[in-house]
Image: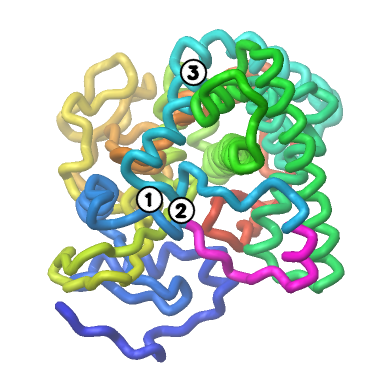
């Protein structure tokens, strides 16, 4: 339906229900001609893999400004509290062009392969300690006991926070998400806003301390790049530094938490997947990539159209909003998404596409995108984005999941889901189970 806007009574469903399971909407959108306008998103849904790549690769036509639009606006009382903090500055997530490159530069340097490699002993030590703390219990609620604490400790370590400050800082930055994506009473909003401001004041103290005493950490990288020089930081510089470190802590925590939840959930939901992984540990990398393809930890972001452009046959105009779905792209059966080499394990793939007894990868003629299968041919998923806004922390997230799976295979091979019915969190910011009870 090129150039035509659908009416607002187009397939309304409960917003929370849509957030908990958006995949039926994604499937319909991929099958439809042109783009589909989704009322729940108040945006045109970009659902096909090649369309997602096109939008993400053309930031001059599709601006990142407003990448995250709040579901709920804070009350005046909450806004009054927030005005006393150090937030509100533009962050890398919503910037374009030179401003984006400037804000992104310290993150790329601070999350480089070398920096991540240097952090792996810390990641391993924390992962082993956390799993060891409940390994003898026979059961655990995975999200609170492991999937949230590990990424919090790791990103806090890389940023350079004192271990005693990390739990409070993570609660505070999560509050920023809670405030605008969860329905709260005014009293609850004010309480969350106060926690956000306390965290911003904590981070401001770190910013001024790193100006006086630079260290080998991500916080220092941010201060150096966003406020070059040696003089005292101005108020505007302090707000920009705090806003971007706050965003970094949130993104570095939530994305990995979500992935740790969904990879374990989907491996255990089909017991054959977990058993295959335990028999063939070399498939850990394949399991991580399949988890990313199957359940993108961040479902997607909005982009604002800057000029008249036609995408997938639909004419868009300046000011129109599209929702670029990384998650839908992962379930697009487009054969062009397949990696040319195709093989994740180290054995040959049989021509008939069946799984070999030794667990090597199959290359099915039928892609079966809605099935979780660690033995499938590799896909070039877009779950960490693409182009200028590709996630600079993707390696760090994958390494945490790799280490976690390797320890679980070794220490808890009898792992099972305690309850088959799992409720996913009602948000598109991160795709994860609300709770995940495991037993062994």
- Whole-percent x and y of residue 436? 70, 46
Front in this rendered view, residue 354 or 381: 381
Give x and y (percent) for residue 72.
63, 71
Q: Is residue 422 left or right of residue 312?
A: right
| Figure check: 252 above or below 76 | above
Q: Which residue is mark 1?
A: 326
**Residue 53 placement (x, y as % from top left):** 24, 48
Residue 24 is left or right of residue 335, and the answer is right
Q: Residue 432 magenta-drawn?
A: no
Residue placed at 21% from the left, 65% from the top? 307
Residue beneath disc 2 = 299
Whole-angstrom CA distance, mark 2 to mark 1, is 6 Å
Of the residues tagged 3 and 1, which is closer to the observer?
A: 1
Q: Is residue 396 left or right of residue 168?
A: left
The residue beneath circle 3 is 281
Residue situated in front as seen by the camera: 249 or 414: 249
- Determine the secondary structure under disc 1: helix
């Amino acid at each position: 339906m090129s150039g035509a806007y659908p009416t607002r009574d187009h397939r309304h469903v409960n917003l929370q229900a849509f957030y908990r399971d958006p995949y039926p909407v994604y499937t319909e959108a991929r099958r439809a001609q042109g783009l589909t306008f989704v009322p729940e998103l108040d945006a045109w849904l970009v659902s096909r893999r090649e369309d997602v790549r096109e939008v993400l690769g053309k930031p001059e036509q599709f601006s990142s400004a407003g990448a995250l639009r709040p579901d709920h606006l804070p009350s005046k009382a909450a806004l009054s509290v927030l005005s006393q903090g150090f937030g509100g500055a533009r962050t890398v997530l919503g910037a374009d062009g030179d401003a984006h490159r400037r804000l992104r530069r310290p993150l790329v340097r601070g999350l480089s392969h070398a920096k991540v490699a240097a952090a792996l002993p810390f990641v391993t030590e924390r992962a082993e300690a956390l799993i060891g703390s409940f390994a003898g219990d026979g059961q655990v609620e995975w999200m609170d006991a492991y999937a949230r604490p590990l990424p919090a400790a790791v990103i806090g370590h890389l940023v350079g926070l004192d271990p005693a400050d990390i739990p409070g800082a993570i609660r505070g930055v999560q509050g920023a998400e809670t405030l605008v994506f969860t329905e709260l009473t005014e009293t609850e909003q004010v309480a969350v806003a106060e926690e956000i401001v306390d965290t911003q004041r904590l981070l401001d103290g770190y910013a001024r301390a790193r100006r006086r005493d630079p260290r080998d950490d991500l916080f220092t990288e941010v201060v150096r790049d966003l406020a070059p020089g040696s003089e005292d930081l101005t108020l505007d510089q302090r707000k920009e530094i705090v806003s971007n470190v706050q965003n970094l802590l949130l993104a570095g925590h939530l994305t990995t938490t979500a992935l740790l939840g969904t990879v374990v959930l989907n491996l255990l939901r089909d017991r054959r997947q977990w058993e295959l992984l335990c028999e063939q540990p070399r498939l850990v990398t394949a399991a991580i990539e399949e988890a990313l393809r199957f359940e993108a930890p961040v479902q997607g972001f909005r982009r604002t159209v800057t000029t008249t452009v036609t995408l997938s046959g639909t004419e868009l105009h300046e000011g129109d909003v599209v929702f670029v779905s990384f998650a839908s792209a992962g379930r697009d059966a487009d054969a062009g998404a397949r990696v040319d080499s195709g093989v994740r394990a180290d054995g040959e793939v049989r021509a008939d596409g069946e799984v070999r007894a030794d667990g090597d990868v199959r290359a099915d003629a039928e892609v079966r995108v809605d099935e979780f299968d660690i033995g499938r041919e590799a896909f070039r998923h877009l779950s960490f984005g693409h182009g200028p806004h590709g996630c600079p922390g993707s390696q760090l997230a994958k390494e945490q999941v790799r280490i976690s799976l390797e320890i679980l295979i070794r220490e808890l091979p009898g792992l099972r889901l305690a309850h088959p019915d799992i409720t996913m969190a009602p948000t598109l910011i991160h795709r994860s189970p609300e709770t995940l009870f495991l037993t062994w």
